[in-house]
Image: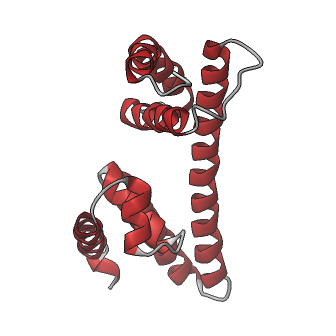
Amino acid sequence: MKAGDRESFNQVFRRYYSPMVRFCIRYVADSDLASEIVQDLFVKLWSNREKISFNTSFESYMLTSVRNSALTYINKERSHAEANLRVFSEESDNTDPSETLQSNNLEESYRKILKDMPEKRREVFLASRYDGLKYSEIAEKLGISQKTVEAQMSAAIKQLKDGLKAYL
């Protein structure tokens, strides 16, 4: 595999992919997300195959990599949630109780809409609005076309506007 033998890589992929996804689900509790994380790891493994050396078994290396990637994802999601909380709490510091209640309802609605978005749409939206990435950067990062990014952003904004109509 280190020498670029695709068949060796395919054999490794077939043998370890499913067990790694099952292991990852323990951390992220979402099979689609777990699958994406493991696929990304295999892409990185293939891309960096010449540089990677294992001090332990391949399986241990992959389990550690899956765990670290899952924890990185969880921490990133937590950071987004904490940033949202800070924004909403800063805005409501000098308001009367009815405005605070409305702000809390708005925040709840916003979070629910984000949670209910299809995974790719949410990823595109968060990458644009929270990570500050340009559409071309998002397309490259997610391996999709820039037109798809534009369509997903448009759909995300429409979904947010529709869901938050009562607050606008």
Name the residue at 60% across, 22% down. Answer: 62
Task: Judge by depth and name the residue closer to the eye, 125 or 90.
Answer: 125
Q: Quadrant of the C terminus?
A: bottom left
17, above or below 44, in the image: above
34, above or below 18, in the image: below
Q: Quadrant of residue 69?
A: top right
Query: Viewed as shown, does residue 65 lie left or right of 35?
Result: right
Name the residue at 57% across, 29% down. Answer: 27
Residue 90, horizontal then vertical, whole percent: 66, 80
Query: Viewed as shown, does residue 160 lie left or right of 96?
Result: left
Q: Quadrant of residue 149?
A: bottom left
Task: Judge by depth and name the residue closer to the eye, 135 or 95.
Answer: 135
Task: Judge by depth and name the residue closer to the eye, 134 or 117.
Answer: 134
Residue 111, horizontal then vertical, whole percent: 44, 60
Query: Viewed as shown, does residue 40 lie left or right of 124?
Result: right
Residue 83, horizontal then vertical, whole percent: 62, 67
Q: Residue furthest right?
A: 55
Residue 88, horizontal then vertical, whole percent: 58, 75
Name the residue at 66% across, 31% down. Answer: 52
